[in-house]
Image (cartoon, rainbow, N blue to C red):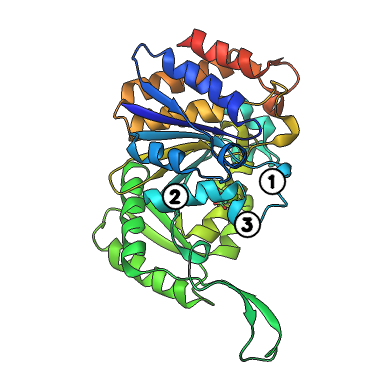
Amino acid sequence: MKIAILPGDGIGPEIMEQAVRVLNALGEKFEMETAPVGGAGYAASGHPLPEATLKLAKEADAILFGAVGDWKYDTLERALRPEQAILGLRKNLGLFANFRPAVLYPELAGASSLKPEVVSGLDIMIVRELTGDIYFGQPRGVRTAVDGPFKGEQEGFDTMRYADTEIRRIAHVAFQAAQKRSKRLTSVDKANVLETSQFWRNIMIEVSKEYPDVALDHMYVDNAAMQLVRAPKAFDVIVTGNMFGDILSDEAAMLTGSIGMLPSASLDKNSKGLYEPSHGSAPDIAGQGIANPLATILSAAMMLRYSLNRAEQADRVEQAVKKVLAQGLRTGDIYEAGTKKVGTKEMGDAVVAAL
Ligand code: IPM
Ligand code: MG
């Protein structure tokens, strides 16, 4: 099994180092090859997704991704910014199914900004469509408006669009995820305003007929945003498009108070995938050895489970993380009085020791 290791920018390399140590501690020799991506890709070869990196990602069985982005690159034109690396990987590899779990670890209930009774036991799975929608829809750009009340002015425009097949395939992924959990699925859209959303909703209803054991309901995205902070435990699996999923998954992650703990998986139709922590590159703390490596370590566990077919090893890694939390070890982001504050490497050491 070959794993592409793409550490990226900011805290990416530090957290990745710990995840690689954990993989190496499992007692199996994985082939791992590292390549630059994001700002690091731009610095190395003038593009955030260098050709050699894309080639490696294509030939690997799975990709472990750190994080991209740094203020240094904010002034580059959009096509060269670090974010283009992750968008390019998603699009080029057809990684349309994004799983973003938001799980509250009982030991960390105090870290949430919501009351403990509102979030205790929280366990949501957001299934976000990742290669369509307004993110990739053409046409887009800036032009002179040819009609409407602002005719003749410059205008910016993007296109929200979803094809039948695109909605259907993410629907199947989401219904199957719901079947493995509590058999409840909430589809989030804006069907009261958007044509794309009404089309999305109709197809969700059609596909639901193939999954009579799953209860499907629909929610407008604004209401979903509100319900997520009012009564988040009412949700189980949420399926939504690329744009709404981007926003709601950050909101859901924050409910757990520990975005530094949350992994994610982006899968293609054959379950080849890219695995990355839900958090960003945190350039403000990069290089200080204080970042939380657990989301990346847990992303490696998801990779073992979904792409490498090694559920038992995935369980071992997840158990090791739980054990380390139970021992009271915390990086700064999840630290509370009465626990022991550790750095990135010490946290990695502890997980390796627990394994
Ligand atoms: C995410 C990020 C990306 C997105 C950015 C970095 C392009 O916010 O993975 O959620 O918008 O999808
Ligand atoms: Mg996002």
Cα distance, mark 2 to mark 1?
A: 21 Å
Q: Is mark 2 within 8 Å of ligand 1?
A: yes
User: Viewer-nearest of labels 2 and 3?
Assistant: 3
Q: Amino acid at mark 1?
A: Tyr
260 relative position to 94: left or right: right
Q: Residues within 10 Å of mark 1 (few under 14, many from 20)?
A: some
- Where is residue 255, by image quadrant? top right
Q: Which mark is residue 90?
A: 2
Residue visible at 49% across and 32% down?
35
Quarter of the image for the N terminus: give it: top left
Q: Is mark 1 within 8 Å of ligand 1?
A: no
Quarter of the image for the C terminus: give it: top left
Q: Which mark is residue 235?
A: none
Q: Which residue is mark 1?
A: 73
Which residue is the extreme one toward the front? 45
Residue visible at 50% across and 73% down?
139
Q: Which mark is residue 78?
A: 3
